[in-house]
Amino acid sequence: MSTFLEAMAFRHACKHFDTTKTIPTEEFEALLEVIRTSPSSFGMEPWRVLVIEDPKVRQALKSSCWNQAQIVEASELLVFTTDNDAVRSDSPYVRKMFARRGLPNDAVEAYMGVYATYLSSIEEDEVLLENWTAKQCYIALGNAMTFAATLKIDSCPIEGFDKEGVEAILDLPYGHSVAVMCAFGYRVNPQSPQMRLPLKDMVEYR
Ligand SMILES: Cc1cc2nc3c(=O)[nH]c(=O)nc-3n(C[C@H](O)[C@H](O)[C@H](O)COP(=O)(O)O)c2cc1C
């Protein structure tokens, strides 16, 4: 428990990263593994993570990301995109994701039915569908940031961007969209004080 809470105390939204420091490959690969093994609704894993290495692409993205310095300064920049078409209830991908559980056909069909019912009101609206797949990304994002903090790697989640601009720069495949970004690296400045609501304002026992 203490390791996790220490990581929570260490983590902050890092505004400036040390451009001379790079995350060791092994640690970065572990971070990607944390994302890969994160849970998602119905196990659909709608995330498709882009690791933006090209400095020219980073520079282009910066202007669509409120000119935030983290975009170009961070050792690693992840863009969580989602494959929204893949998770539509009539998609072969969905069947594959259920079938991989090794269930008999009738059980797969039953899952498909429950899934189609659940998704029916979501998938009829592109924005709702994008929001649903994006929600899954935020679970992986949280895991990644806390895991990084256990390795004393700093991060900054980034929602401050022009979605259409970023999607145009990244030239995403049809049916894909950008959910959220995260920069990872090492802080330059000391961490600012962590400001949070007191527990009594956050939790209510009923
Ligand atoms: C989903 C999400 C998106 C965020 N987007 C940005 C961003 O674009 N730029 C930024 O500097 N901080 C961003 N933040 C950081 C928050 O402002 C920050 O987490 C909050 O103020 C609490 O501060 P702390 O994380 O440093 O404790 C984002 C945080 C979250 C969770």
Image (cartoon, grey):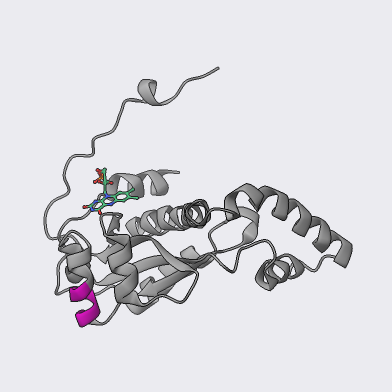
Q: Quadrant of the N terminus?
A: top left
Of the pair 138 and 128, the residue shown nearer to us: 128
Q: Say above or below: 191 vs 141.
A: above
Task: Give residue 103's quadrant in the image.
Answer: bottom right
Residue most extreme to the front: 124
Question: Residue 118: x percent and y percent?
Answer: 67, 48
Is residue 84 found inside the magenta-colored segment of the image?
no
Question: Residue 198: x percent and y percent?
Answer: 32, 25
Of the pair 18 and 119, the residue shown nearer to us: 119
Work out whether residue 78 can be spotted: yes
Task: Give residue 196's quadrant in the image.
Answer: top left
Instruction: Tell me: 109 left or right of 28.
Output: right
Residue most extreme to the top: 206
Question: Residue 170: x percent and y percent?
Answer: 33, 75
Question: Residue 166: x percent and y percent?
Answer: 30, 68
Residue most extreme to the left: 189
Which residue is found at the position 28% from the left and 80% from the top?
53
Is residue 59 found inside the magenta-colored segment of the image?
yes
Which residue is found at the position 47% from the left and 54% from the top?
127
Magenta residues, as a range?
A: 55-60
Instruction: Tell me: 101 left or right of 181.
Output: right
Q: Quadrant of the C terminus?
A: top right
Q: Main secondary structure of the magenta part?
A: helix
Work out whether residue 30 can be spotted: no
| Count of all numbered marks drawn on residues in the image | 0
Which residue is found at the position 68% from the left and 66% from the top?
94
Of the pair 177 and 195, the residue shown nearer to us: 177
Instruction: Tell me: 109 left or right of 86.
Output: right
Which residue is found at the position 14% from the left and 75% from the top?
20
